Image (tube, rainbow, N blue to C red):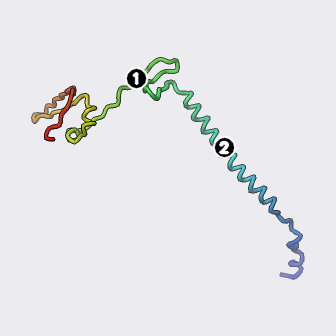
Amino acid sequence: MSRSTVKDAPEQEDMPTVTQQQSRNVAKLCVGFVFGLVFLLGVLLGMNILANALSKETHTDPITGEMFTDDGQLVVRTGVVESFSGLLALLRASPEQLSKLTYAFFATTWLDGRTSWDSWKIASFSRFGH
C-alpha cells in the first residue's frame, strides 16, 4: 500500500458528524412509531371484538342466564346451579352444607347386574353420634 492512498482518504474532520440533537430526534421518532403501532394494534383488536359481538345472533343476560335472539325472543333459560357429591362427602359435610340439600339420589347395582335409582326429597337432617 502506498503512502498516496493514505493521503487521499478524507480526514476525520471533513466527514459530516451526527449531532446529539439529530440522534435524539431519531430516537423520539422510533419511540413514537412504536407507540403508534401499539395503539393501532389496540384499535384493530377493539374493532374485532366489537364486530364479533355485533354479529352474534343471540345474546345472554349475565345476571339471569337467559338467552335472547336479536329481536328479543327468549331462546334458552338456564336452571339453578346444582352440586353433586358421593356418599363419603355427604357423611363428612358440615351442617351448613347439609342445610342446603334438597334432594338425595342413589344408584344401587345388584349382584345380578340390575341397577335401581332412588331419590328422596330432603325435608330436614340431624347428626347422629354427636
Residue drawn at x 15%, y 34% as measured from the top left:
109
Q: Secondary structure at mark 2?
A: helix
In this view, the residue in front, 3 or 43, is: 43
Q: Which residue is mark 1?
A: 77
- Give the x, y percent position of residue 3: 87, 82
- Classify 34 as above or below 20: above
- Give the x, y percent position of residue 82: 31, 31
- Classify 59 as above or below 96: above
Q: Quadrant of the N terminus?
A: bottom right
What residue type is disc 2 on? Answer: Phe
Residue 19 shown left or right of residue 78 in the figure: right
Q: How many numbered marks appear?
A: 2
Q: Which residue is mark 2?
A: 39
Residue 75 shown left or right of residue 55 in the figure: left
Crowd class of label 2 (few under 14; some 14 to 19; many from 20; radius 10 Å): few
Please, which residue is most extreme toward the front here? 130
- Classify 75 as above or below 37: above
In this view, the residue in front, 76 or 79, is: 79
Residue 116 shown left or right of residue 39 in the figure: left
Q: CA distance from mark 2 to mark 1?
A: 40 Å
Residue drawn at x 25%, y 39% as measured from the top left:
94
Residue drawn at x 26%, y 37% as measured from the top left:
85
Q: Secondary structure at mark 1?
A: loop
Q: Quadrant of the C terminus?
A: top left
- Give the x, y percent position of residue 57: 51, 24
Q: Which mark is residue 4?
A: none
- Give the x, y percent position of residue 122: 21, 28
What residue type is disc 1 on? Answer: Arg
